[in-house]
């Protein structure tokens, strides 16, 4: 989908909320693509994902009554983040958010001076947190791929181990984003099950004290989503299965490549121009062979292993600081809000 076509589509009635919503309109400082279109790995059937950042109004800033949850339009797969929330996500090197600072110029459909300030200072947000954020997301994709492949060939207890692996990966993210807890206070493990059709299942031991109930609710919800995502894979038909598996494999390797670049100090390069042909071969299933009448992903896992090694080496030898540049980010947020207030 060419940028000119996307630009015209954004002017249509379908996207009128971008202009008419009281918190959007002129408050949008950055509007760009997300997902496959942002990476250059889209196909004819790919959805158009739009991502953006907006500032709060003068009144909201002065009264400190600021919205800080994103505005979503599910019909168009559009998500617009407010400045406060996006800064927190960027500080954690969230892959789905940091990529907005590295999309190619042709995909910048709105870029105000404030939005340019964020993109020009993307390095303020980059730190060794990328090891866990990009590594965690990549591991989640790997687990989804393994789980999907395992479900038709592995016994139930082996499938349960894959789900546990996904949950352990998710725990790193949960420990960073919610009230502190240790692996001992919230422990996950596998034991024999009395459940029908289950040999073993995942259990948890909880020893939390004086813990915020809302954080625990969010943690439980995130863990439930991991299990739900796995189970949803069980209800796909074979053709869709194949397409989804190849897409998971592609995004897994793309995450490892992007994460490695960031850790090596190359910045945020969202559009995968130099990797596009390679990634599209993965998406098109060119590295999947047939064995015993079934798809064999051995070559894919060999490629994953190669890029995981590169990622781990970059993590061990990274030039990035252990923490993002909080003071500079704070000054940047002040400067942006000053511009909004006309100061």
Image: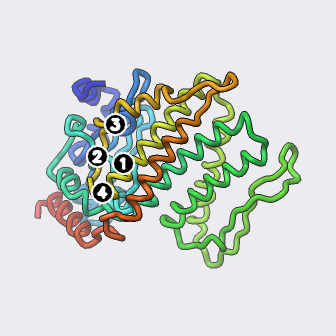
Element carrying mark 3: loop
235, 73: nearer the viewer = 235
| Quadrant position of the C terminus in the picture | bottom left
Query: Picture quarter containing residue 332?
Result: bottom left
Mark sitting on residue 83: 4
Asked if disc 4 and disc 2 are in contact, CB closer than 8 Å, the reply is no
Mark sitting on residue 323: none
Q: CA distance from mark 1 to mark 4?
A: 24 Å
Residue located beneath label 2 in the image: 269
Residue 264: image x %, image y %?
A: 31, 57
Crowd class of label 4 (few under 14; some 14 to 19; many from 20; radius 10 Å)? many
Query: Tag 4 or tag 1, which sits nearer the N-term?
Result: 4
Element carrying mark 4: helix
> Is 278 left or right of 208, judged from the image as shown?
left
314, 142: nearer the viewer = 314
The residue mark sitting in front, 1 or 4, is 1
Query: Tag 2 or tag 1, which sits nearer the N-term?
Result: 1
Residue drawn where x is 41% and y is 36% of the image: 77
Residue located beneath label 3 in the image: 275
Asked if disc 3 and disc 4 are in contact, CB closer than 8 Å, the reply is no
Crowd class of label 3 (few under 14; some 14 to 19; many from 20; radius 10 Å)? some
The residue mark sitting in front, 4 or 2, is 2
Element carrying mark 2: loop
Asked if disc 1 and disc 2 are in contact, CB closer than 8 Å, the reply is yes
39, 153: nearer the viewer = 153
Residue located beneath label 1 in the image: 258
Q: How is the image coloured?
A: rainbow
> Is 249 left or right of 291, judged from the image as shown?
left
Query: Tag 4 or tag 3, which sits nearer the N-term?
Result: 4
The residue mark sitting in front, 3 or 1, is 3
Q: CA distance from mark 3 to mark 1?
A: 10 Å
């Amino acid at each position: 989908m060419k940028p000119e076509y996307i630009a015209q589509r954004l002017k249509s009635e379908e996207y009128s909320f971008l202009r008419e919503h009281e918190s959007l309109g002129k408050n949008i400082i950055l509007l760009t693509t997300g997902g496959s279109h942002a990476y250059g790995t889209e196909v004819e059937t790919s959805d158009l994902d739009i991502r953006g950042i907006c500032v709060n109004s003068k009144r909201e800033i002065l009264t400190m009554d600021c919205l800080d949850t994103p505005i979503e339009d599910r019909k168009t797969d559009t998500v617009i983040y407010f400045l406060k929330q996006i800064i927190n996500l960027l500080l954690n090197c969230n892959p789905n958010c940091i990529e907005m600072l590295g999309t190619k110029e042709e995909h910048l459909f709105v870029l105000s001076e404030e939005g340019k300030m964020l993109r020009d200072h993307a390095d303020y947000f980059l730190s060794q947190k990328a090891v866990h954020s990009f590594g965690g997301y990549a591991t989640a994709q790997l687990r989804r791929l393994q789980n999907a492949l395992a479900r038709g060939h592995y016994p139930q207890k082996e499938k349960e181990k894959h789900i546990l692996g996904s949950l352990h990966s998710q725990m790193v993210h949960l420990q960073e984003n919610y009230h502190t807890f240790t692996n001992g206070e919230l422990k996950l493990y596998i034991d024999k099950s009395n459940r029908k059709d289950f040999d073993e299942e995942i259990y948890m031991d909880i020893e939390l004290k004086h813990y915020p109930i809302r954080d625990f609710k969010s943690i439980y919800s995130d863990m439930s989503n991991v299990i739900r995502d796995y189970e949803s894979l069980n209800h796909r038909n074979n053709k869709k299965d194949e397409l989804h598996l190849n897409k998971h494999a592609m995004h897994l390797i793309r995450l490892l490549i992007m994460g490695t670049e960031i850790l090596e100090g190359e910045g945020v390069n969202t559009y995968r121009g130099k990797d596009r042909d390679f990634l599209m071969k993965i998406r098109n299933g060119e590295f999947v062979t047939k064995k015993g009448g079934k798809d064999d992903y051995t070559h894919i896992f060999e490629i994953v292993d190669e890029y995981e090694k590169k990622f781990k080496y970059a993590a061990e030898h990274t030039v990035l600081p252990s923490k993002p540049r909080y003071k500079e980010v704070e000054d940047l947020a002040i400067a942006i809000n000053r511009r909004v207030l006309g100061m």
